[in-house]
Image (cartoon, rainbow, N blue to C red):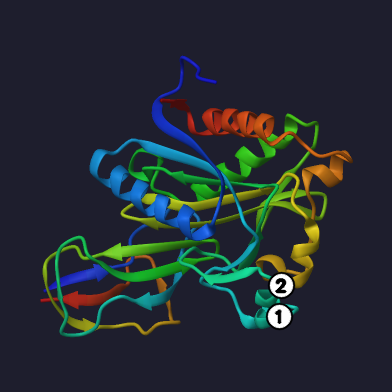
Amino acid sequence: MTEVKVPDLGEEIKKVTIASWLCKSGDHVKSGDDLVELVTDKASFAIDAPASGVIHKILLKEGSEASIGDVLALIQ
Amino acid sequence: MNNIYAKHLCQYKDLGLISYEEAYRIQQEAWNDVIKTRGHKLFFCEHDPVFTLGKLAKDEHFLLSQESIQKKGIKVLRIDRGGEVTFHGPGQIVAYPIFDLNVLGKDLKAYIRKLEQVAIDFLQHFDIVASSVEGKTGAWVGNRKIASIGIGVKKWVSYHGIGINVNTDLNFFKMVRPCGLDVEMISLQALLGASVDLKDAKTKLLKSFARHFELKFA
């Protein structure tokens, strides 16, 4: 199982908001595919798949807040 | 324009007056190029009148209905940058840096701060003292906003960017709460009491980008 985590976005950013999921549970994804869009104030940031596989579970809904390092989804 | 100490090679192009959609397509193409070949690209342009809604834009940020704005021939587009609602139109220089932040620094706030410094530095060429304001992104002259920033980043390559009101018709901003704030916008033209030569302004803006991002232009 591979974890999809909120990456370190730089010194001042501690929290992000999940703007939109670009995949759903059960989707086949390739390493590098965009999975989820985060927003923080004036920036949007897309997280891509760290590995190929199937989206096993999405852990945080759109609109919720996450901290750096939080696991957002699992890829099997 | 180029200085011998610059570290990063950058391709620059002035797109002139161009629709928002066409400029967005060019940004996406450039983003793909930067991902494949690395390097950096920078575009300057002006847009036909358009309101764009970032990820945090809300309907209440419009002071007129979106329908009545569209009836005036002004587009309203929901887009994939951070931030709220803003206006682009003729006389506003929009800069779209497609920069490889893997090289320039993987820090979103630091990147935004540098864009603010570019705008502040650019305005100094016209003897205008602007500043950044803690908690309010952009460049400000007193309590009036002259430059707005909204960025997108994928695989640590940037797109979207910064709009600086040079000769912008400020009446357009009265239709919205720019950036979700009750803020007065200002332009360089309004501050100087005369319109500014855009070609000259773009040359000065390019110098400010070169200085703050240590760029040399191809």
Residue at the image point whose x is 33% and y is 43% from the top: B102
| Residue hosting label 2 | B72
For numbered disc 1, what is the local secondary structure?
helix
Q: Amino acid at mark 2?
A: Lys
Task: State the separation of the CA atoms marked 1 and 2.
Answer: 7 Å
Height in image: B43 above or below B135?
A: above
Q: Is residue A43 left or right of residue A18?
A: right
Same chain, labels 1 and 2 = yes
Q: Amino acid at mark 1?
A: Ser
Residue at the image point whose x is 45% and y is 82% from the top: A63
Residue at the image point whose x is 37% and y is 69% from the top: A37
Residue furthest out toward the right: B193
Residue at the image point whose x is 29% and y is 49% from the top: B32
Q: The N terminus of chain B is located in which quarter?
A: top right
| Residue hosting label 1 | B68
Height in image: A55 above or below A48?
A: below
**Total labels drawn:** 2
Task: Identify the subunit bearing mark 1.
Answer: B
Q: Are marks 1 and 2 in contact (CB under 8 Å)?
A: yes
In the foreground, B198 or B121: B198
Residue B183 appears in view: no
For numbered disc 2, what is the local secondary structure?
loop
Badge 1 crowding class, 10 Å Cα cut-off, few under 14, some 14 to 19, many 20 or more, is few
Q: Residue B166: x and y, percent?
A: 73, 44
Q: Residue B180: x and y, percent?
A: 67, 71
Task: Identify the subunit bearing mark 2.
Answer: B
Q: Is residue B164 left or right of residue A26?
A: right
